[in-house]
Each structure stands twice: as C-alpha cells, then as structure tokens.
Amino acid sequence: MLKVENLRKVFRTEEIETIALNGVSFDVDEGEFVAVMGPSGCGKSTLLNILGLLDNPTSGSYSLLGQEVAAFRERDRTKFRKGNIGFVFQSFNLIDELNVFENVELPLIYMRVKAAERKRRVNEILGRMNISHRAEHFPQQLSGGQQQRVAIARAVVSNPKLILADEPTGNLDSKNGREVMELLSELNREGTTVIMVTHSQYDSTFAHRVLHLFDGELVKDLANRM
C-alpha cells in the first residue's frame, strides 16, 4: 500500500542546515497498524507530514496506493489527500465556529458529496463514536475525550484508505486515551491502514509493528509481540 525509499528532508536557513530525515525506507501493507516512536526531534512528525502530503521530501521516493505521490503538483496532492487520507492530531484541530455535526461534515463538503448523503454518513459515524447526543454542541462545550472522538469521526467519515494519527492520546487522561486507541484499533481491524506517531508505550501495543527513529534515521523496525 505504501512504500518509502531513501526519504530525506533537510530544512535550510541562511546559516543552518538541519537534517530531519536521513535515508528512511520502509513499506506498509494494506490493513497494517504501524506505530512510529522515538525521542523528541527525531523526525517523527516530519515523516508523518510527508506521508500525509502536507510537506515534500527533499529527496527520495514515496508511493501510496501504487502512485508516486512525492512529486505531485499541489492541486493533485490536495485532491489525492482528501480522497484517501484521514488525519487525527493531538490538538484535535476542530473549528470552534462549527458545531460537532458541521466539523465532521466538512470533508464531505470538500468532496462535493450531496447533502442527503452527507447527513446520512455524519449521523452514522457520530452514532458509532457515541457522540450523537453532542451533534449540535461546539468544541469548547466538549471534554477532551469527546473532542478527540469528533476528530476521529471527521477523519474517517470520508472512508479513507489511510489514517495518520499524530500523538492522538497526548492531551487525554488514561481512560479517554484507552478509548481512543480502542476506536483506532477497531477501525484498523475493519481494514483501514493506520500509521501513528506516539511517545506512549501503551499506545504502541495496539500496533502490528513499531518503527523507531533516532536523529532522522530508522534504527529499528520491529514486529510487535505484545
């Protein structure tokens, strides 16, 4: 499903060159759950941004669903991203001016899905996430766990092939964090590929494999026996 070869990312200023990723290579099969771990500043989030087509690598190749996407033009990248990738962030990234229903509906509006179908799909995913009773509430009226459930609903309402999660439990207590990981695991069992950046050893136990980054290099790629 996903193939990364010799990926490099270099950030340059007038005086400083910082190598964020240095020759990273790995494959992810359809339906896998992969965790990416490593110390702060090791390149985890940079890698996730490139996989999500939010940033370009300096060099190397990246193919997703059989297409070489690293060299896509911006319009093609945006179209491909909206149709195939869902994002879950530590900070939830909900729009304060929109209620729960409207936040979740937004990706379908971008995809030009008809109103009746949007309503059906949003109501279905809100029910699945046990957040239907909050459909008309705004993000600031929700707990952290509820906000992350809304964020997951928004990520999956378009039926993406790949979910990218960046520290999805980082702002949650242990109970809500466990529930969020169980939701991601359930989606994975149904066939959605998940790649997750995390500092949490507990969260990593939900993954099939754990990639360990250090100073921008992939130093371990281990099957998870937990």
Image (tube, rainbow, N blue to C red):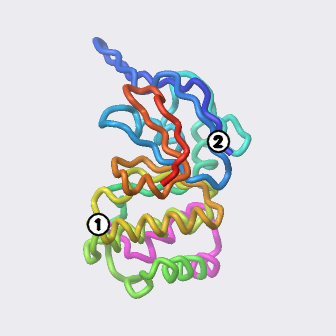
Indicate which disc, 1 or 2, sits on the residue closer to the N terminus.
2
| Placement of 109 over or under 209, stated as above or below | below
Q: Is residue 183 magenta?
A: no
Q: Residue at x 35, y 16 (%)?
A: 17
Q: Residue at x 35, y 20 (%)?
A: 18
| Placement of 111 over or under 59, stated as above or below | below
Q: Quadrant of the N terminus?
A: top right
Quadrant of the rendered image containing residue 25: top right
Q: Is residue 98 magenta?
A: yes
Quadrant of the rendered image containing residue 21: top left
Q: Residue at x 61, y 65 (%)?
A: 189
The residue tagged 2 is 2
Q: Where does the magenta region start and end?
A: 96-119
Q: Is residue 160 visible?
A: yes
From the viewer's side, name the closer residue of 47 and 217: 217
Q: Secondary structure at mark 1?
A: helix
Label 2 CA crowd tier, 10 Å (few <14, some 14–19, many 20+): some
Q: Is residue 80 left or right of residue 59?
A: right
Q: Main secondary structure of the magenta part?
A: helix
**Residue 141 tag number:** none
The residue tagged 1 is 174
Q: Is residue 132 left or right of residue 60?
A: left
Residue at the outermost front position: 225
Quadrant of the rendered image containing residue 7: top right
Quote the CA–CA distance across marks 1 and 2.
31 Å
Q: Is residue 70 visible?
A: no
